[in-house]
Image (cartoon, rainbow, N blue to C red):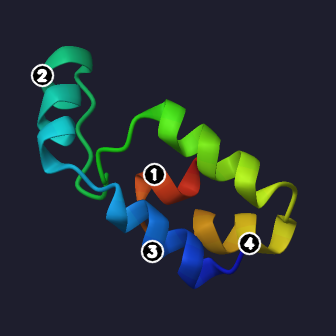
Amino acid sequence: MTYEETMGRLYALQNPEKVIFKEKKFGVVSNNSLGIYHSELKKIAKDIGKDNELGLQLFDSGTFDGSIS
């Protein structure tokens, strides 16, 4: 899976309501969060498998959710 494909999947799952929910419930304030639940991120990570180069690109993506994928 490429960086563009992965980011496309992440943005397709983007949910601003979940960002607000996480801020209220957990006190997590993040200006660069997409509001994706961890279970969804785990599915994407499983599809990617081990890919260090992609991992570094996602970490540098500027999105919280991309950096923990």
Dot 2 and dot 3 residues touching (CB under 8 Å): no
Q: In this orientation, does residue 61 appear?
A: no
Mark 2 / mark 4, whichever is N-terminal: 2
Q: CA distance from mark 1 to mark 2?
A: 18 Å
Mark 2 / mark 3, whichever is N-terminal: 3
SS at mark 1 in the image: helix
**Numbered disc in front, either 1 or 3:** 3
Residue position for label 4 = 54
Q: CA distance from mark 1 to mark 4?
A: 14 Å
Mark 1 / mark 4, whichever is N-terminal: 4
Residue position for label 2 = 24
Dot 2 and dot 4 residues touching (CB under 8 Å): no
- At 19% from the left edge and 16% from the top edge, which residue is drawn? 25
- At 45% from the left edge and 74% from the top edge, which residue is drawn? 8
Residue position for label 1 = 65
Dot 1 and dot 4 residues touching (CB under 8 Å): no
Q: Residues within 10 Å of mark 3 (few under 14, many from 20)?
A: few
SS at mark 3 in the image: helix
Q: CA distance from mark 2 to mark 3?
A: 27 Å
Q: Amino acid at mark 3?
A: Gly
Q: Amino acid at mark 1?
A: Asp
Q: CA distance from mark 1 to mark 3?
A: 12 Å
Dot 1 and dot 2 residues touching (CB under 8 Å): no
Mark 3 / mark 4, whichever is N-terminal: 3
**Residue 11 horizontal side relative to residue 2, left or right:** left
- At 23% from the left edge and 38% from the top edge, which residue is drawn? 29
Dot 3 and dot 4 residues touching (CB under 8 Å): no
Residue position for label 3 = 8
Residue 6: x and y, percent?
57, 70
